[in-house]
Amino acid sequence: MAAQSRKGMGMMQTVEEVMTKAPVIPVVTVQGADDAVPLARALVAGGLPAIEVTLRTPGALAAIEAIARDVPDAIVGAGTVLNGAQLSDAVGAGASFIVSPGVTDALIRAFSDAPVPVLPGAATASEVMRLLEAGFTHQKFFPAEQAGGVAMLKAWSAPLAGVRFCPTGGVSPGNAPDYLALPNVLCVGGSWIAPGADVARGDWAVIEGNARAAAALAGG
Ligand code: 3PG
């Protein structure tokens, strides 16, 4: 069974619960625990508890571990997961959910056995169908703007009814309301809330403000 539903009795959330904590899942790239913890605190304070930490830096796993340990109100996930080894590493570090930009046969197998909720990526109707066949009703639409944006999701809503998306890639405060207005969209993802320059400067107040504005977004 695909790891998108509740398993066990603990604090595990379903992927739908992760996707509906707030209208936006911030996608963050950090160097390690030192910047990850204050960043996560700022995002949580601004109203965005579900945070995707990309596995794109050597310190990403340490960052996930530190957030999971030190920011109890955060729901920290790992993004840019490309293979089963990264999935295991991320879960070992304490990731509460896993996001991928797309899938392979091997990644679908790994995701099917994952002990935490997963949000696999798709960019075409065939990819959405392949994931649906494997039991994944909740998917990341990536890269959203480049792959057809709001119009693509509207076109999918009838033939691919039942699939719920988190569009990510090119999403901004300007176009997020258009995505969030769609019935097949539960949330959007994006890096605009925590720009690299603000993270590098440690400008947590700016990031908290961005998070607060993002948390107030709604379909329009
Ligand atoms: C991702 O990793 O999901 C995307 O790179 C985020 O896309 P954005 O930077 O366009 O928000």
Image: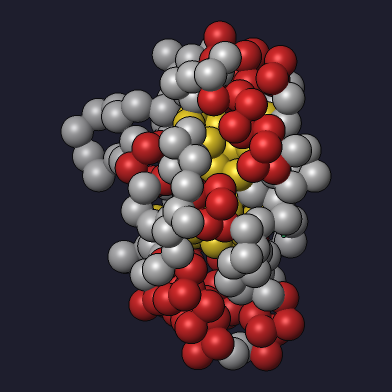
Image quadrant containing the N terminus: top left
Give the image location of residue 74, x and y in percent.
Answer: 38, 63
Residue 7 location, quadrant: top left
Tell how many labels: 0
Does 176 sit left or right of 19 as displayed?
A: right
Residue 17 in which image quadrant: top left
Of 157 and 51, the residue lying toward us: 157
Does residue 77 appear in the picture of this structure?
Answer: no
For the view shown, which residue lies furthest in the front direction? 220
Q: Residue extending furthest left?
A: 9
* Residue 177 at x, y percent in the picture: 52, 57
Question: 74 and 145: which one is in front?
Answer: 145
- Res. 141 image quadrant: top right
Residue 92 in the image, given as x and y percentages of width and height: 50, 45
Residue drawn at 67 percent across, 37 percent down = 151
Residue drawn at 61 percent across, 88 percent down: 202
Any part of residue 130 in sight: yes
- Rendered view: 164 above or below 1: below
For this view, does 173 lie left or right of residue 181?
right
| Colouring rule applied to residues | secondary structure
Residue name at image x 57 percent, y 57 percent = 176
The vertical placement of 166 against 115, above or below, is below
- Above or below, comparing residue 19 to residue 177 in the picture: above
Q: Residue lying farthest right?
A: 146
Instruction: Pick whichever, 76 or 198, lies toward us.
Output: 198
User: Vertically, is 187 above or below 111?
Assistant: below
- Identify the residue shown where x is 50% and y is 90%: 205
Residue at the extreme top: 133
Give x and y (percent) for residue 5: 35, 27
